[in-house]
Image: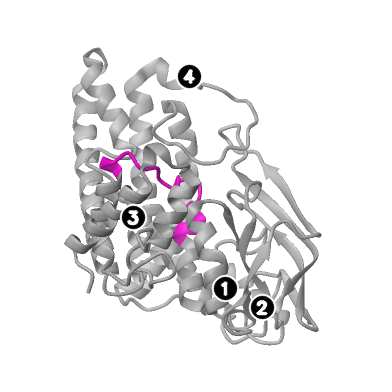
Amino acid sequence: MTDAAELRRRTQELLAEKAPADTDRLDFLRARFDAGLAWVHYPEGLGGLGAPRSLQPVVDAELAAAGAPDNDPRRIGIGLGMAAPTILQYGTEEQKRRFLRPLWTGEEVWCQLFSEPGAGSDLAALGTRAVREGEDWVVDGQKVWTSSAHLARWAILIARTDPDVPKHRGITYFVCDMTDPGVEVRPLRQITGEAEFNEVFLTGVRIPDSRRLGETGDGWRVAQTTLNNERVAIGGARLPREGGMIGPVSRTWRERPELRTHDLHQRLLTLWVEAEVARLTGERLRQQLVAGHPGPEGAGMKLAFARLNQEISGLEVELRGEEGLLYDDWTMRRPELVDFTGRDAGYRYLRSKGNSIEGGTSEVLLNIVAERVLGLPSEPRTDKDVAWKDLAR
């Protein structure tokens, strides 16, 4: 088994062969992938070495100390956190070798075509249809709240392939080429003034059966892998102490003593402790991932992430007083990533409102924690055994 010393040796060999100062960024990232140092827990030949996931920080620390470039993970978070683990688990060998390398290097951006106007919290009620025609599937429908669709080359897509069975059993999972005819991306302008989200219209889009992930009709099970990883990716990102939203408000508190009050002090202390508990819980969750794939526990992390972001950003606006009501720029833009810490307090306050909706609403996640983590009785579901075509819509 590859240990920390072996990973350091391999990393130093990569740095000696591809000195960061003298190597094109993309060439370095490709070489890192080929050396198995992209995500060390992936199999050999797919960017990894079959090593424990817990050893990835060993490689990251060596590369950071050498000034090596990274793959801009915030820009390609959907590919890294959602598409890649799903492809790894359910993809064919040909699919893994085609998609994982350019996904990790950032040469190809991914988006997620799951939610629909009538199927958000109840995702299994989705109505986008995929009909088999020879070796292709013809897809028609509409998706919504699609981050990075305006940048993406590929999308992970779930569609209804059998309307005659209950809703969870008639779904199939595909990889969709966003450059194909019939794919139309329209911006959705948000409360921040920007349009990082999109709605996507699919009209007669032909997807080869070779780009299906998993078995026909088994898409809901495949999608659970994506959704569990999504919640960990959103709520369980690795952070240093005072990383994330708690950092800017803590700095303001230290640098602006004239803004302090006793009440704000007590609230900040409470949120600081809760943010640190959430950070350490995330570390524990990532250690559990070493033993397997993420489970429903990620829903709890995402719940905490949303609540804390909203409460911390609200406190920051109050702390800054009139300054907190200012906003830097309402220009309509289509950004490549969400930057919570690099923007002003007003942006953080407005953007955090979406945290309790994206990646699963807090209400749905509470049900997941109750049923799958705590083992409480499920809510009554009258449509569980009803064919999708017979559901009231």
Residue at label 3? Answer: 236
Marks 1/4: CA distance? 48 Å
Report the mark closest to the observer, 2 or 4. Answer: 2
Residue at label 4? Answer: 326
Dot placed on the residue nearer the N-terminal end, 1 or 4: 1
Q: Amino acid at mark 4?
A: Leu
Q: Is residue 65 magenta?
A: yes
Q: Are marks 2 and 1 in contact (CB under 8 Å)?
A: yes
Report the mark closest to the observer, 3 or 4. Answer: 3
SS under mark 2: helix
Q: Position of residue 289 (x, y in %)?
A: 29, 68
Marks 1/3: CA distance? 27 Å
Residue at label 2? Answer: 210
- Magenta range is 64-81
Q: Position of residue 268 (x, y in %)?
A: 23, 33
Q: Quadrant of residue 154?
A: bottom right
Q: Nearer the viewer, residue 173 or 15?
A: 15
Marks 3/4: CA distance? 30 Å
Report the mark closest to the observer, 2 or 3. Answer: 2
Marks 2/4: CA distance? 51 Å
Q: Residue furthest front?
A: 17
Q: Residue at x 48, y 42 (%)?
A: 24
Q: Amino acid at mark 3?
A: Gly
Q: Amino acid at mark 2?
A: Ser
Q: In the picture shown, does residue 136 fall above or below 320?
A: below
Q: Main secondary structure of the magenta part?
A: loop
SS under mark 4: loop
Q: Position of residue 216 (x, y in %)?
A: 63, 84
SS under mark 3: loop
